[in-house]
Image (spheres, rainbow, N blue to C red):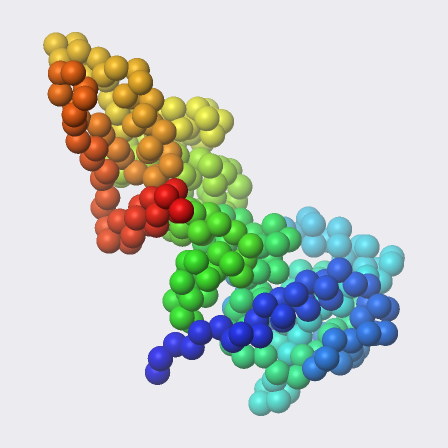
Amino acid sequence: MARQALGKGLDALIKQTQEVSEMTTQQVMQAAPSGTTVQRIPVNKIVPNRFQPRRVFNEEKLQELAQSIKEHGLTQPIVVVYDAGLDKYEIVVGERRFRATQLAGLTEIDALVHKHLGDQEMCALALIENIQREDLNPIETALGYRNLMSKFYITQTDLAGYCGKSKAAISNALRLLELEPAIQESLQDGSITEGHGRALLMVTDPVKRDTLFKKMKNSKMSVRQAEDAARALTNPAKKATKGAKPAEVASFENDLQVALGTKVEVKYGRNMKKGTLVIHYHSLDELDNIASRLKNKML
């Protein structure tokens, strides 16, 4: 069965959901958007979103939110869609609030109920809402992008538009999934940042990359230090007999490597007026990403 593109009404749905997320429960009850109702739903009738991109929920922050809900109530409703087959309400937006409500010991929760949402809309809204709240770690964001692109007919360009990101940002996020599992785990638990991950992608040799990763964690390198270390590994000093590469050429290579996320070499003759620019890639996906970045630079 062919994948279906996101419906034309997704932009309006995203805008509507954003507006609801900024309204108090009382405001939503007074002016529920078209095609929705506001209900107080038993907590045990609610199930998580199948497309929830978030995999890590900070327990300490959940406890803090639960305490706030105990004292002040839920200030914003969650958004759900009713599944008649299961006789359950599936969360569209607000799983963190739902979990905190459970921790607070409450048996009911205020919810904006959509009459119907397709899988595409469910997946997109769950991803976009979390991204806009900056609630996801880099790997969760990348997995969310990949999930949306693989399940539905969505290009990186379309996805960038829906999420309010540049195409380069989407491409950079997806490349993090090429990193080894141990590195991805560190990106998830916050022991290294997305900037550190991009620096590691500059090192294509797995052994050298692992060495840098361990050094990065043990010495608590800054992103700038990590980038410098990655450049040193990808552009080792030339042997003295051959002479050092001119500083302007090395700087040019480094700038391109950061921009393209891969090894770049400038090979030139004696007078440097002619030469060859070599851009390395290790998979067709990586080649596509490099081509996309170059096109974006030219537009």
Residue 211 image offset from top left, x and y in percent: 32, 31
Q: Is residue 184 left or right of residue 74?
A: left
In the figure, 228 relative to 59: above or below?
Answer: above
Please determine whether, in this image, residue 195 is positioned above or below residue 122. above
Q: Residue placed at 27% from the left, 38% from the top?
A: 204
Res 16 → quadrant: bottom right
Q: Residue at x 54, y 79 (%)?
A: 118
The quarter of the image holding the N terminus is: bottom left
Residue 52 shown left or right of residue 258 in the figure: right
Whether residue 56 can be seen here? no
Whether residue 287 is visible here, answered yes or no, is yes
Residue drawn at x 16%, y 25% as measured from the top left: 274
Relative image position of residue 12 (x, y in whole percent): 63, 70
Residue 154: horizontal and vertical position, in percent?
Answer: 42, 66
From this view, report whether residue 90 is shown above or below residue 70.
below
Q: How many marks?
A: 0
The structure residue drawn at horizontal position 54% and vertical position 57%, both measured from the top left corner, is: 163
Q: Nearer the viewer, residue 259 or 75?
A: 259
